Image (cartoon, grey):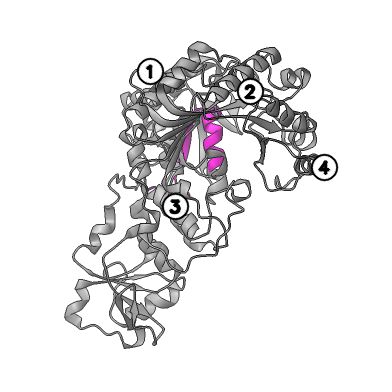
Amino acid sequence: MDSGHDSFEFLIDLSGAGDMTILTGKKIIIYGTGRFQMDFETIFDLPVAAYLSEDKQLTRYNQKPVHFVDDFFPALQEMDSLAVIVCDFERDRILPLLAKKGFVHGHNSFYAEDLFETLDQLRIDFSTTPVALWGTGNACKEFLDYYSANWAEELDIRYYLDNDISKQGQEYRGKPIRHPSSSPPDELKRAFIIVTPSFYTDIKRQLEELGLVEFWHFAFWSFVLVRPSLMLKKVIHSTPRPGPECAYATSRLNVAMHGVYACICIPFMTLPLGNILVQSCEEIWHSAAAKIFRLSIVNHTYCFCKLPFCNEANKSKPVRNHYGSADIAPSDVLHTVEFAFDCTCNLHCESCRDTAIHAHAGKIHLQIADRLLSSPLVNAAEWCLCCGGGEVFAGKGIERLLFSESAPVRNGGIIQTNLQLFNEKNWQRVRKHFRSIHFVASMDGATPETFERIRRGAKFDVMIRNLGLLAALRKTGEIEKASINMVVQNKNYQEMPAMLELAESFDFDAVRFVQIMNWGSYSEQQYRNEITMFENDDIVMKPELKAVVDFIRSREYNIMAHFEWQT
């Protein structure tokens, strides 16, 4: 595409139908029987009339007739009423073969991948389209990291836009930063603008006032990143392997920072499925992207999972020989919703952030909370898990979502908290909205020195006092479970046995040991040399950690020790 053009050849289609109308009224025949065909039919779920096969012995498949390809010569008057879709990797051999039988590619014969783009909400060839990114903060970095981790095509970034006038003339990742007022509207139209900040509504209004049109000249980053056509190609061309069949994909959703929406847990996925700032929860839950993600688990390719870190990884099952759309159908009622979108916290732990994050982004957090409260799907969820992004008793967004008068009463809640703000008032707020309660206390040191050094801003004596409060509630049966969550790193791994003993002294149920990750707080060299207790593959324990784990396993405790990594 000529970068001087002020328009782009793409189609926005929110219905998912798009070019599939070319198949309307046609008798659909699938060329191929096998994993490619199963993947295709699982997502498209078309009314297939018959199959074509090169196996002469195969006469029935999926309760439909199978025609031997060499004997397949439909009458001329039938040709316009047929649509043969090739689900086979040998495209260059099969399409010419069909052409010799009178089929015309694009009219009554199609390669399956030709139809994948009909799944996309935003269709634009970013390999030939110049782009500008709006924003130079954490959301922009997150978008670029996701994009490079998932898609081979590189973005042709010409410059960045930012409303912060002080950044005018500076560079970000080697490209100039411009203030929107520095370029006339015609200049802005020469690159497709990808908006990364969460304040999309405000930026959208600003761009529209300059004469730019959403989806024609600009779009929110999730529409660019989440590309079902690319997802499905990746899934189909990947090799299946034995692994878990995770039920979470059809029964659980997670809403994380910046409104990012996913199944399972964000840390264990390489790609989000959408963003609730621009889409409803229901829309994303039933979207093509969500279907393809579930397919990647059913067909055992795990293209968007960080499988080595998955808690279900050891529950391996053989690769399926048969599956279909029913196997990826999402639950009508969610079992669990996980909320980790409000990063507000009274602490500033060294592994997480440099300074305490107060309600500086409260507007967005409240907006996300309101969108979640308006979702029937979310409100009907049986269980709620919160909060991995900040402190559950500090953020205004999470407070509105969980404890306001409009918040639903749920069967159960898992409340993760640093306990520094826990008191009788907050306990009463929790018990009002959850029938069954499991408290998880975040505690990264079993001694005052280690605890206060890592969990900056926290007081060990306050922690011990409130552990006692939880223990009393656990003893009376007012809470169902109480446990401790310890993020393991070089500065505290030696205190893992002491943490078990501490939890045991309060009659808690378990200690969950979690592997520290680099959430942007460390340089790669510092993280590898000074922080993590795992080798460079992030899977194998360093000998020092393995010795502590072996010691714990050799002892008998009255509580459970859960290791959230492969041991």
Magenta stretch contains residue 240: no
Residue 195 visible: no
Q: Are marks 3 and 1 in contact (CB under 8 Å)?
A: no
Q: Earlier in the sequence, mark 3 or mark 1?
A: 3
Looking at numbered disc 3 in the image, what kind of residue is underneath it? Answer: Arg
Of 160 and 353, nearer the camera is 353
State the extent of the magenta-drawn residues as a range: 123-146
Q: Earlier in the sequence, mark 4 or mark 1?
A: 1
Is 211 on the left-hand or right-hand side of 403?
Answer: left
- Separation of disc 4 and disc 2 at Cα? 30 Å
Residue 14 position within the rendered picture, expressed as x and y whole percent measured from the top left: 29, 44
Residue 260 visible: yes
- Mark 1 secondary-structure assignment: loop
Is 123 on the left-hand or right-hand side of 254?
Answer: left
Residue pointed to by mark 4: 547
Residue sitting at x 68%, y 48%:
566
Of 42 and 221, nearer the camera is 42
Residue pointed to by mark 2: 353
Q: Residues within 10 Å of mark 4 (few under 14, many from 20)?
A: few
